[in-house]
Every structure is written in C-alpha cells, then in structure tokens.
C-alpha cells in the first residue's frame, strides 16, 4: 500500500485502554476475566489496525503476548497439590486484573476532572444582552462512540468483504487522495441530511486501499466537525450525520 495511507492516531491511549474498552463493551467482570474471549477480541482489533497500516506501538504487541501467555497458562492441566499450597496458588490473571483496576481508577478520576474543567469553561461574566437578535450556532457533539468502536466497525466491514478478487489477477493501482474521498463522503452525507448514512454504506468498493482511505476520510471529517458518528448501543450500526460545519 502507498506510504500516503499510513497514519498515526493520537486517540489511542494504550493497550490497557483497549482492554478496558473491551471489558465494558462485552460487560465482562473485571475480577473474573475470561482470558480466551478477551484475547480473541483484542487480537481482532490488532489485525484491524494492521489492515490500516497503523504504526502499532510495541506496548500493544507486548500486551498481546502477555494475553497469549496467560491463556496458555490457563489451559495447562492443574497439578495435584495439597490444600495449603492450593490456598496460595496464584491466579495467572491477577497481575493483569490489578493493572486494569488501577488504570480504571485513574481514567475515572481523569474524566471527573475533565467534566469539572468543562463546567468551569461554561462560566462567564458579562453585561446582560438580548439573545433574540443573535444567531446562535448549536454546538456539534461527536456522539458517544470511541475510536475503538470505529476500528471495530471497520473490522466487521473487512470481514464481510473478504476481498473476493481472484488469486491470479493483475492489480491496477489507483491512487485515491484522501482529500478527494473526504469531499465525496461529505457530499453523500449532505445529500441525506434528513436521514443518517450507515457507516457500512460508505464502503461501496472492494479494494483495500479504497476502504482504508474512506475510513481515514471519515475520521478527518469527524476531527474537523463536518460529520458526526453515533451508535445507540454496543455492536449496533454506526450512523454518520452531517454536522453543517464546513471548513
């Protein structure tokens, strides 16, 4: 794939953030993590990132190795030990569980401080004015989905398409500038202002480069507040809305 399609996303906060996202998404008990399930879902996200040619930090790969090691330990047959040793037998998940609990505490504290900061930013002092004569623009809200929800949706798109081209074929490379794809996506969303566009419907072609550029175009449009993506519940369809903030 062309070097122009490679991208670094600052939204990723680290492997613990991704694991916590999966735990919340699948409603998993953090004190009793099903390692096989969480490892499978984590690896699905890593593979989706690799499809996008994201520069995956080594810490993500270290966590993947850690999960696989814990999974292997959980699969090993338990040796017969006496009751005293069994009482002190260490759960292979214990260290990871403690790290996640600690991370969640800091994340919740950070969110609380962020809310207080936003509340403080809404406090102003000024002389009274008549607002009826002013054109007040509604603040655009980006919705309640995260970059991980977007990556997950892309992974499902890739899984469904499966790139059905024959194995023995001649590839004709077509460069797709991201700015051009942004304009195309924005035009489609604008034409449907009265109803939202399903995320999957924006990926009409089967070429991998087209899918990747389309995904990046949507992220850029969200970043500049030109479109908003929303999802009513986990695993439900993501819908793209026009925000009306042209740049």
Image: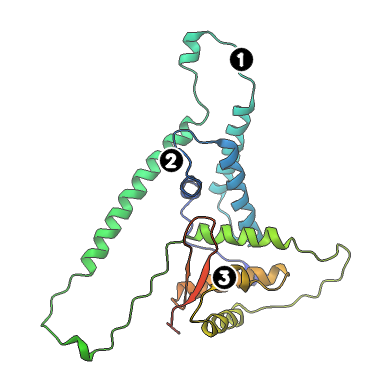
For the C terminus, give its image quadrant: bottom left
Cα distance in 3D space between marks 2 and 1 = 28 Å
Which sits earlier in the primary sequence, circle 1 or circle 3? 1
Cα distance in 3D space between marks 2 and 3 = 33 Å
Q: Which residue is mark 1?
A: 79
Q: Residue at x 57, y 66 (%)?
A: 7
For the N terminus, give its image quadrant: bottom right
Query: Which element type, helix, strand or loop, lies under badge 2?
Result: helix
Q: Quadrant of residue 29?
A: top left
Query: Which element type, helix, strand or loop, lies under badge 3?
Result: strand
Query: Which residue occupies the extreme right position in the image?
Result: 168
Is residue 18 shown left or right of residue 112?
right
Q: Which residue is mark 3?
A: 198
* Foreground pick, 205 / 182: 205
Is residue 106 shown left or right of residue 127?
right
Can residue 97 be seen at all in this image of the molecule? Answer: yes
- State the image coordinates of residue 198 (x, y, percent, origin top left): 57, 70
Can residue 1 be seen at all in this image of the molecule? Answer: no
Which sits earlier in the primary sequence, circle 2 or circle 3? 2
- State the image coordinates of residue 102 (x, y, percent, origin top left): 38, 40
Q: Residue at x 70, y 60 (%)?
A: 160
The answer to whether the residues at label 1 and label 3 have Cβ atoms under 8 Å apart is no
Viewer-side label of 1, 3: 3
Up-down relation of residue 148 to residue 171 (above or below) = above
Up-down relation of residue 197 to residue 190 (above or below) = above
């Amino acid at each position: 794939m062309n070097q122009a399609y490679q991208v670094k996303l600052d939204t990723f906060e680290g492997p613990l953030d991704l694991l916590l996202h999966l735990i919340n998404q699948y409603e998993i008990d953090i004190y009793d993590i099903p390692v096989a399930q969480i490892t499978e879902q984590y690896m699905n996200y890593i593979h989706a990132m690799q499809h996008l040619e994201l520069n995956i930090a080594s810490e993500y790969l270290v966590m993947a190795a850690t999960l696989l090691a814990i999974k292997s330990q959980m699969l090993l047959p338990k040796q017969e030990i006496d009751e005293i040793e069994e009482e002190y037998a260490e759960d292979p998940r214990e260290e990871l569980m403690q790290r996640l609990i600690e991370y969640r505490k800091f994340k919740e504290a950070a969110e609380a401080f962020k809310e207080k900061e936003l509340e403080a930013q809404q406090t102003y002092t000024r002389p009274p004015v008549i607002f009826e004569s002013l054109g007040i623009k509604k603040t655009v809200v980006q919705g309640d989905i995260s970059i991980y929800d977007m990556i997950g949706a892309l992974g499902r798109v890739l899984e469904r398409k499966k790139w059905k081209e024959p194995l023995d074929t001649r590839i004709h490379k077509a460069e797709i500038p991201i700015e051009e794809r942004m304009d195309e996506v924005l035009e489609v969303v604008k034409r449907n202002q009265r109803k939202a566009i399903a995320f999957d419907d924006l990926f009409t072609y089967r070429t991998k480069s087209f899918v990747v550029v389309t995904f990046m175009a949507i992220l850029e449009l969200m970043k500049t507040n030109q479109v908003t993506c929303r999802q009513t519940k986990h695993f439900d369809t993501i819908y793209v809305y026009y925000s009306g903030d042209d740049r």
